[in-house]
Image: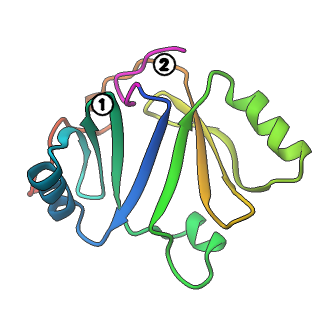
């Protein structure tokens, strides 16, 4: 699997939504011992712990709201794969509920989003380039002024 500085290197990356990303990051770092890896403005952060990772995000809008009419989901699961297009084709052939087809991101990933039979949201991601976070607007720490 290609390495990308903009993505944690583990294969499964839970994403949890919080109303205040900075407060959640501070709490998770202080209480659970996570380490801030990467901040993206005030709406998203990557945390490391041991060989694992967690993404903290602000409450979802748009795409994710389609999957959960009762409100924003509080989580999604990100899984890194070696061939996202093949993975997408397999899911689509089996009539999975695709929320977003594969698309390239400025941070070096190609991803698609799908809703499983239990209503859980999955994001499958393939690293396509090693992109420095500062090249697409990320930062290595959360700045309260962002």
The residue closer to the viewer here, 116 or 92, is 116
The residue tagged 1 is: 133
Q: Secondary structure at mark 1?
A: helix
- Hey, which quadrant is residue 16 in on the image? bottom left
Task: Identify the residue at image location x=49%, y=70%.
Answer: 61
Q: Residue at left 52%, top 50%?
A: 77
Relative image position of residue 3 (x, y in whole percent): 44, 16
Q: Residue furthest top?
A: 2
- Neighbor class of circle 2 (other Cα within 10 Å; few <14, some 14-19, many 20+) is some
Q: Is residue 60 above or below residue 127?
A: below
In the rendered view, tell whether residue 45 sits above or below residue 136.
below
Nearer-the-camera pick, 25 or 118: 118
Which image quarter holds the C terminus? bottom left
Mark 1 in CB contact with mark 2 (< 8 angstroms)? no
Residue 41 vertical position relative to residue 3 in the rendered view, above or below: below
Verify whether residue 84 appears in magenta.
no
Majority SS type along the magenta span = loop
Disc 1 crowd rating (10 Å Cα; few below 14, some 14-19, many 20+) is many
Q: Position of residue 36 (x, y in %)?
A: 18, 40
What are the residue bounds of the magenta stretch? 1-9
């Amino acid at each position: 699997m290609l390495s990308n500085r903009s993505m944690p290197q583990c294969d499964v990356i839970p994403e949890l939504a919080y109303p205040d990303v900075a407060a959640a990051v501070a709490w998770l770092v202080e209480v659970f011992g996570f380490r801030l890896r990467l901040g993206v403005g005030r709406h998203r952060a990557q945390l490391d712990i041991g060989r694992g990772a967690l993404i903290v995000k602000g409450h979802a809008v748009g795409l994710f709201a389609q999957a959960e009419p009762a409100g924003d989901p509080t989580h999604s699961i990100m899984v890194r794969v070696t061939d996202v297009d093949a993975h997408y084709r397999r899911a689509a052939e089996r009539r999975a509920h695709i929320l977003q087809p594969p698309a390239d991101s400025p941070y070096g990933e190609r991803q698609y989003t799908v809703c499983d039979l239990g209503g859980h949201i999955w994001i499958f991601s393939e690293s396509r380039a090693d992109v420095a976070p500062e090249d697409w607007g990320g930062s290595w720490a959360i700045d309260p002024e962002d």
